[in-house]
Image (cartoon, rainbow, N blue to C red):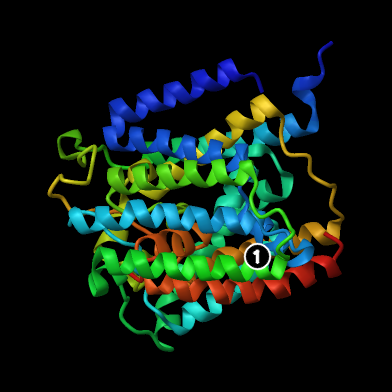
Amino acid sequence: MKRLPLAAAMAAFFVFLLWSVAVRQAALFLVGIGLGAALAGARFGFTTGWRRLVEERDPRGVVGQLLLLGLAATLAMPLLGAFPELQAALGPPSISLLVGAFVFGLTMQIADGCGSGTLYKAGLGVPLNMGILPLFALGSFLGSVHLDGWLALGQTAPVGLVSLWGVGGALAATWVVLLAVGLGVRRWAGWQQAWWDRRWIIGAVALALLATLNLVIAGQPWGVVYGFGLWAAKAATALGLFDPAGNAFWSQAGNAQRLAQTVLMDVTSITNIGILAGALWVAARQGGEAAKPLTGRQWAIGLAAGFVMGYSSRLAFGCNVGAMLSGISTGSLHGWIWVPLAFAGTLVGIRVRRRFGF
Amino acid sequence: MNTTVFSAPALRALLFWSVLAAFLAWDWARSPALDLTLEPPLIAAGSGQAASGGHCSMAK
């Protein structure tokens, strides 16, 4: 696609948001475009980074992600301490988190993309991820419908490290753990391996800055999954397939309000749209992602994985963005629980991926 | 004849974006009009208004 008509379309949508929706939403659309451009331009794939560490002992992607977490925390935690209006991404430690994170880590390898990965690859034109997007939304919606049942299996109150230890204590603890993980990663990869790459570093810095901008503007950390579930919830409700008033999650005041109003007022939805647009912009300049043709069986498995990924991300209170990046950078214990479970799932997912010839 | 616009990737992208645009247009058309006087502040930090958006970390 030529960039000029694309730029015109993006500008028109921006003006529409500015004039008819909210200035904040127009600003968040721009943040989303930046996020999409950074993800796609740097090919900043959380999923790929983990896989390369395991399969090739290549630590560069994971080091980039660790840098992103550290930078985002360094920016976000003091802001949370200074501005009471800002919210951390505090998910409850729960049985659903344990199950959801593991399954998410597994399925994201098969789908070759997590929440943000699905978005930017769909924007780049990768067929499997374009097909996964609506199924991810459906899975996320169903996960939200069932969430109350999962939480009844066991949960504790969310734990926020900034509230518990103060900004300094939470930030110090975060950096200590990130550095320890980094040392472990380097040891696994081998000290002679190149451990950083310009592409990943630039991506990490750009994403940290944009995620912080999202926090400052929206008052809450960057998220991906909620928007997907909301879109599917709206469709299901409009088709008469779902009654939100009878559901524990969607009958809650905030969710009910978001269900009733346009998705363009939803923070997560507008940044998701921006990410798609930003990735499309990169594709228009660099060309789309060259995707290996898949067999019918691989398509079926990939799409099924995308659906389960959406479902599990809801149970896990976020994906790589909502739980790992936003959770850890804003001091949520659930983010730290999410990572090892998701990584364990990824070890299985990589084998499944290999088994089916992806 | 320039066949680029009819390539499979281009058609796929067109379909994808058409479906997304149609969904957003449908949603906008059926949603109640927004009261622009009640729009949230541009910058939440320092606004005095707590964030009220949905997020995947929320249990409710």
Residue at coordinates 27% horizontally, 32% vertically from top-left? A23
At a point 38% along the width and 84% down the height, the residue shown is A155
Q: Residue at x 41, y 37 (%)?
A: A31
Can residue A212 be spotted in the picture?
A: yes
Residue with the most extreme front position: A192
Instruction: Look at mark 1 in the image and give the residue it sits on.
Output: A186
Relative to the observer, which residue lies in front, A322 or A55? A55
Q: Amino acid at mark 1?
A: Arg
Query: Crowdedness of circle 1 by 10 Å Cα count: few (<14), some, many (20+)?
Result: many
| Horizontal and vertical percent position of residue A178 | 49, 66
Residue in the foreground of this view, choosing between B8 and A328: A328
Q: Is residue A233 visible?
A: no
Number of numbered callouts drawn: 1
Which image quadrant: the N terminus of chain A? Answer: top right
Q: Residue furthest left?
A: B48
Q: Nearer the viewer, residue A283 or A179?
A: A179
Position of A263 compared to A274: left or right?
left
Image quadrant of residue A357?
A: bottom right
Residue A127 location, quadrant: top right
- Against A235, residue A285 (above or below) is above
The secondary element bearing badge 1 is classed as helix
Q: Residue B44: x, y in percent?
A: 22, 45
Eyeballing the image, is A330 above or below A12?
below
Quarter of the C terminus of chain A within the rendering: bottom right
Q: Position of residue A163 (x, y in %)?
A: 23, 70
Q: Residue furthest bottom?
A: A153
Which residue is the extreme one toward the top?
Answer: B1
Q: Residue at x 20, y 34 (%)?
A: B36
Left or right of B20, for residue A174: left
What chain does mark 1 sit on?
A: A
Residue A145 at x, y percent in the picture: 44, 70
